[in-house]
Amino acid sequence: MLNATKSNRLTRWYVGILTAVCLLLMARWLTQAAAKEKPPAGGKWWPSEWGAGDQRGAANRMTPQKVLEATGLIHAGKVYQLGRLYEHGMPLPGKRHFSLTIPGSPTYGPSGKNKTVAFDEIFSGEIGQIGTQLDGLGHFGARIGDEDYFYNGFKRSEFAKPYGFEKLGVENIGVFFTRGLLLDVARLRKVERLQPGYAISPQELQACLEGAGLKIREGDVVLVRTGHGLLWMKDNKTFETGEPGLGVDAAKWLTSQKVTLIGCDNWAIEVVPHEDRELNFPVHEWIITRNGVYNLENLDLEELARDKVTEFAFVFAPLRLKGATGSPGNPIAVR
């Protein structure tokens, strides 16, 4: 009788231990599963204000009224080219590359009685991510668990194909034709150029606007001059190593103004090294992934700045590269 009682107690003890272990393992699994699907700091950013299927983001803010507003800013008829020259030896941060060659001599001909000849070129490079470049909405995302999420919550596994994305390609953007503003922070700080690692604040952007007697309006393009572009093709090593640029607070302030695009005379828009060394390109994540606003990098803003042009018509037509993450080009300002 005593042995049976002792056996029952041992059985209950083992069952209790096994139950506790199972509950502990289940709780751990549930915690890990929840953490696996938890969005980064800031929470879920989708669906977009333009609907769950939207692929244009802030480009939706460019209405016919914005086009008319922009044309009303043209008085002198002067055109400013804001794009850099695509050439061998230009700054290429990271491991990107650029190559342009002319094959054959000539490629075609001579042909016909008039012996005409023609030449073609072969290009190799990350066409949407070198030189003056527009970052499309498929360029930057954030990993949550085992999945990469992009603007509007689109998942990489559902649209990323090796020969072009099936969502968020730059062909969805359309043409930028809207009011543009230049905020010259280097001039505000009375320096030729801001130093790498200098984080621009919302207060500085506001001070530039107040100095020019301007206000940002919905659908505008805002270009920020740091002076870093003066290093282009003169000191590429310093240009590529780091840069002054937008701090996270400045980026959040600009998106709160409902801008369409943010451009800068550096290679990443944001300050490098970042304010928080544990984060990777947090301004990109905020602007592109979370808000659907576009980045336009490596701009030449020097002529605009010399002429003290602060308000203008901004025009840029990204190449219609189906499924591409970005576009090269030569944006222009007209006043």
Image (cartoon, grey):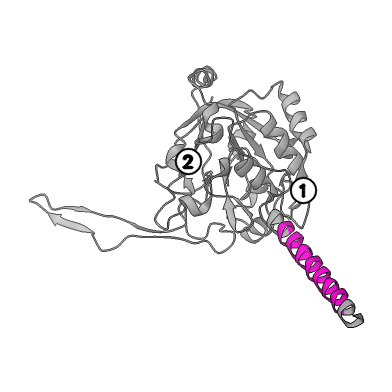
Asked whether residue 130 appears in the rendered view, the answer is no
Q: Is residue 58 above or below residue 290?
A: above
Give the left or right position of residue 301, taking residue 275 as reference. left
Q: Residue at x 66, y 25 (%)?
A: 216
Q: Nearer the viewer, residue 329 or 234?
A: 329
Q: Amino acid at mark 1?
A: Tyr
Question: Which residue carries the number 2 mark?
Answer: 330
Q: Residue at x 66, y 52 (%)?
A: 37
Residue 279: assigned label: none
Question: Where residue 309 sits: x, y (%)?
Answer: 62, 28
Asked whether residue 34 appears in the rendered view, the answer is yes
Q: Secondary structure at mark 1?
A: loop
**How far, Cα to Cα, is label 2 from label 1?**
27 Å
Question: Where residue 287 sits: x, y (%)?
Answer: 64, 41
Q: Is residue 263 above or below residue 3?
A: above
Residue 198: assigned label: 1
Q: Is residue 195 above or below residue 238?
A: above
